[in-house]
Image: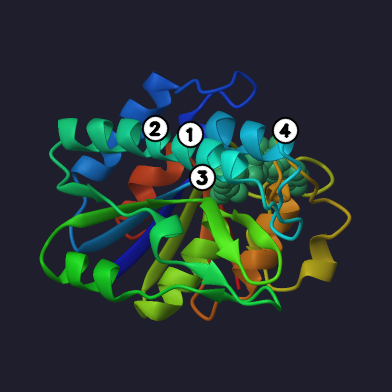
């Protein structure tokens, strides 16, 4: 059983305060992961580490930068968050190891992502838990653009033929217009009026971007809050199922 799990930046950081980890939430998530079994690849988002730098340099998933300073700032912040996530996971006994997308992933000029998965697949086979993250990546004809953790989850899940995909965010699921968690989404148009951007600084589209991206996945994905993480890892289907 191969699981790809995203820990949202909105969960593990205090998203409005630059470079601030939400230690309590990260410890809760790590404790849940400490008890998990099977092959697990973790991806985390940018939260208050990646999005502030990306926004301040005007970089998004489509608007590129040719400024090497911008690339180092965005990537450097994401590496610092990655180190904090790995430290927390190691504390709970998870054999976590870092994988930095900038070093291997890139976009073609039409924006399609290339992610050579050999290192991650081998890392999993050998019993480690690779921990990847949203990042800045080289983009042919654009310089460099942002790769969201959600897009990476989809690419990884497909490349690894994952059985389960989970996206743990700051909300209990995708809410409808009345604030109730939607049980199942299989078309963006059905929820377009209810889903929006993030309430915080976010260059990758908040919940609307997440739903759109996850709908492109072959395997079904679940969006849930940190309260649902243990249940998801136990094989349940908390929150909103997408696809
Ligand atoms: N209909 C909706 N249901 C749930 N959340 C919504 C909805 N519309 C907008 N949102 C916003 O989307 C946010 C989740 O998207 P966001 O991209 O911030 O999450 P994340 O993936 O956890 O964080 P990051 O992008 O930093 O990794 C919620 O916190 C909320 O502010
Ligand atoms: C902003 C950066 C560098 C990563 C964005 O990843 P996301 O938070 O998963 O959308």
State the residue position of label 1: 77
Q: Tag 4: Cα neighbours inside 10 Å, few (<14), some, or many (≥20)?
A: few
Residue at the spot x=12%, y=39% of the render?
93
Residue at the spot x=38%, y=75% of the render?
116
| Mark drawn on residue 45 | 3
Q: Secondary structure at mark 1?
A: helix
Q: Is residue 142 above or below residue 23?
A: below
| Residue 47 relative to residue 201: left or right | left
**Which of the two discs, 1 and 3, labels the residue nearer the N terminus?**
3
Q: Is residue 172 visible?
A: no
State the residue position of label 2: 80
Q: Secondary structure at mark 4?
A: helix
Distance Cα–Cα, label 1 vs label 2: 5 Å
Residue at the spot x=39%, y=32% of the render?
80
Distance Cα–Cα, label 2 vs label 4: 18 Å
Disc 4, ligand 2: is the CB inside 8 Å?
no
Q: Are marks 1 and 2 in contact (CB under 8 Å)?
A: yes
Determine which quarter of the picture holds residue 21.
Answer: top left
Distance Cα–Cα, label 2 vs label 3: 12 Å
Q: Is residue 112 above or below residue 136?
A: below
Q: Is residue 213 visible?
A: yes
State the residue position of label 4: 56
| Residue 131 relative to residue 126: left or right | right
Q: Are marks 1 and 4 in contact (CB under 8 Å)?
A: no
Disc 3, ligand 1: is the CB inside 8 Å?
yes
Q: Are marks 2 and 4 in contact (CB under 8 Å)?
A: no
Where's residue 190, x and y in %?
A: 82, 67
User: 185 and 198: which one is in front?
Assistant: 198
Which of pointers 3 and 4 indicates the residue nearer the eye? 4
**Which of the two discs, 3 and 4, labels the residue nearer the N terminus?**
3
Distance Cα–Cα, label 3 vs label 4: 17 Å
Distance Cα–Cα, label 1 vs label 4: 13 Å
């Amino acid at each position: 059983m191969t699981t790809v799990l995203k820990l949202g930046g909105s969960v593990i950081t205090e998203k409005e305060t630059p470079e601030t980890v939400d230690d309590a939430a990260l410890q809760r998530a790590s404790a849940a992961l400490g008890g998990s079994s099977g092959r697990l690849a973790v991806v985390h988002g940018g939260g208050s580490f990646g999005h502030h730098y990306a926004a301040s340099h005007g970089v998004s998933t489509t608007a590129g930068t040719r400024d090497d300073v911008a690339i180092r700032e965005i990537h450097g912040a994401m590496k610092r968050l990655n180190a904090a996530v790995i430290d927390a996971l190691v504390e709970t006994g998870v054999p976590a190891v870092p994988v930095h997308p900038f070093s291997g992933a890139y976009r073609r000029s039409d924006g399609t992502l290339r992610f050579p998965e050999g290192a991650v697949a081998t890392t999993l086979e050998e019993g480690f838990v690779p921990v990847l993250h949203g990042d800045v990546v080289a983009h042919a004809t654009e310089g460099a653009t942002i790769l969201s953790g959600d897009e990476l989850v989809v690419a990884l899940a497909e490349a690894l033929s994952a059985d389960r995909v989970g996206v743990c965010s700051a909300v209990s699921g995708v809410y409808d217009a009345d604030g109730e968690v939607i049980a199942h989404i299989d078309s963006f148009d059905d929820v377009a009026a209810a889903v929006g951007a993030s309430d915080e600084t976010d260059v990758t589209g908040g919940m609307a971007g997440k739903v759109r991206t996850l709908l492109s996945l072959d395997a079904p994905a679940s969006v849930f809050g940190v309260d649902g993480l243990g249940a998801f890892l136990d094989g349940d289907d908390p929150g909103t199922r997408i696809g």
